[in-house]
Image (cartoon, rainbow, N blue to C red):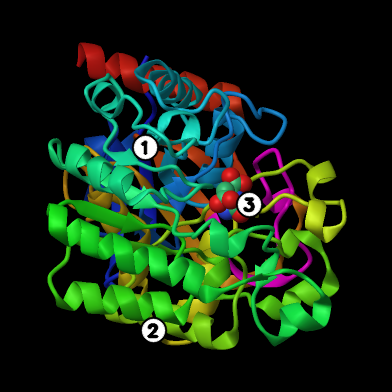
Amino acid sequence: MSNPSYLIVGATLVSGERTDLLVQDARLTPVAPNTSNSNTAGAIRIDAEGLVALPGLVDLHTHLREPGFEQSETVLTGSRAAAAGGFTSVFAMANTMPVSDTAGVVEQVMALGDDAGFATVRPIGAVTVGLAGERLSEIGAMAHSRAQVRVFSDDGKCIHDSLLMRRALEYVKTFDGVVAQHAQDPRLTENAQMNEGALSSELGLKGWPAVAEESIIARDVLLAEHVGARLHVCHVSTAGSVEVIRWAKSRGIVVTAEATPHHLLLTEDLVRSYDARYKVNPPLRRDEDVEALRAGLADGTIDIIATDHAPHPTESKESEWDAASFGMVGLESALSVAQTALVDTGLLQWADIARVLSQKPAEIGRLADHSHAFEPGAPANFTLYDPSSSSTFDLDRLAGKSTNSPYLGLTLPGRVQYTFHHGYPTVLGGTVVDSTTVAASAAAWKAGRTHG
Ligand SMILES: NC(=O)N[C@@H](CC(=O)O)C(=O)O
């Protein structure tokens, strides 16, 4: 059985233009308002008055935790969180258990995503075996597996050995892949707990200097230039890093970079609370860094926003600061935080948000069959977002398994009202569709693709 058709009435595109959208057989077609014909007649109508239609968001940096850490998140619950946030594709980081360093594990992660149906799940392969930083993993086998991995990362750990980093860049170059580096000099950050500066001294927490990030980025852009391969820098957090990347781009080095929503909004002052929800890698920095990251996104030095959604169980966040895990969930709040930090401040328009949260991450990850334009026949992956509402971000906004969000209890603007993946809804009227229905829609989509 094929999935039903939908007629989205009165949506606003990022250009400001208003349109109706017919969603049929996993594709979309913009139609002039008040069009009625045999196709639109049988379609389920959705009133999109006041809603911004954005292309399905793409997260290049998500921790889905499966296999191995299912108490924090699974592929199903993480992709449900993605849908709740307006995402239709996520790239799943490799720090699972076993580590995603073989064709077998990456194919398993992809298959779990396909079955769940909430989002397209593209696994990221580990650069080194077991993330141990000692020898390269089966990069080629993962690239040529059914998962067709194009993004490789040891995220959570830095590829610190310069020769290994060089070899990794040389390897991924052969199939147009990219190395996504977690830039953190391990020696400069041993036991580090928060941004290094006056506040870390005052609070008595071990400091994490900006140079630990900046020095690795500086080395890596030079290696990328030397090899002529693609480098991507994960979660840039300091003003100095933005400067280094700006310099590299001005030299023509092929480097892309991401900033997380939390580094675009929150600062180290929150650490005063000793509330471990604010403990994250890299750490929250200063106002000047937030400003530089925002400016970097606005001028294209920083290419994309990526969530670094890092779910952790309550017990590993409710311990004392030093013992708590690093990381915050971010998929469900990403658009609202982007609106607060970038749109409501006048730095970015909605068209820019579509670029940094959909078009560019899809390009960097070489995501197949992605369209960020609402063109006739485009894959029906999109989200309808209400920017005018404002509400307390509370537990019912979290659709994943973990609750380590820094925004709980805060008032945030905007709300994802609808998300469509492959032409079927994963979020309807602000509510995430139940998993059984979504899995059935995904199966119907797959059957249609095979037999259509
Ligand atoms: N970003 C985080 O704070 N945490 C990440 C990995 C990491 O340490 O980068 C995680 O996997 O929990």
Q: Label 3 belongs to which residue?
A: 329
Residue 20 place in picture, x, y as percent: 31, 55
Q: Please name which of the two marks, 2 or 1, marks the residue nearer to the observer.
A: 1
Residue 163 place in picture, x, y as percent: 29, 46
Q: Which mark is residue 127?
A: 1
- Relative height, residue 62 to residue 19 (above, below): above
Q: Nearer the viewer, residue 32 or 82?
A: 82
Q: Quadrant of residue 81?
A: top right
Say whether residue 256 is visible.
Answer: no
Considering the image in quadrants, where does the C terminus appear?
top left
Tell how many labels. 3
Classify mark 3 as within 8 Å of ligand 1 or not, answering yes or no: no
Residue 99 place in picture, x, y as percent: 50, 28
Q: Label 2 belongs to which residue?
A: 295
Please report the residue visible at 32 percent of the width from the left and 51 percent of the height from the top.
162
> Label 1 is placed on what type of residue?
Val
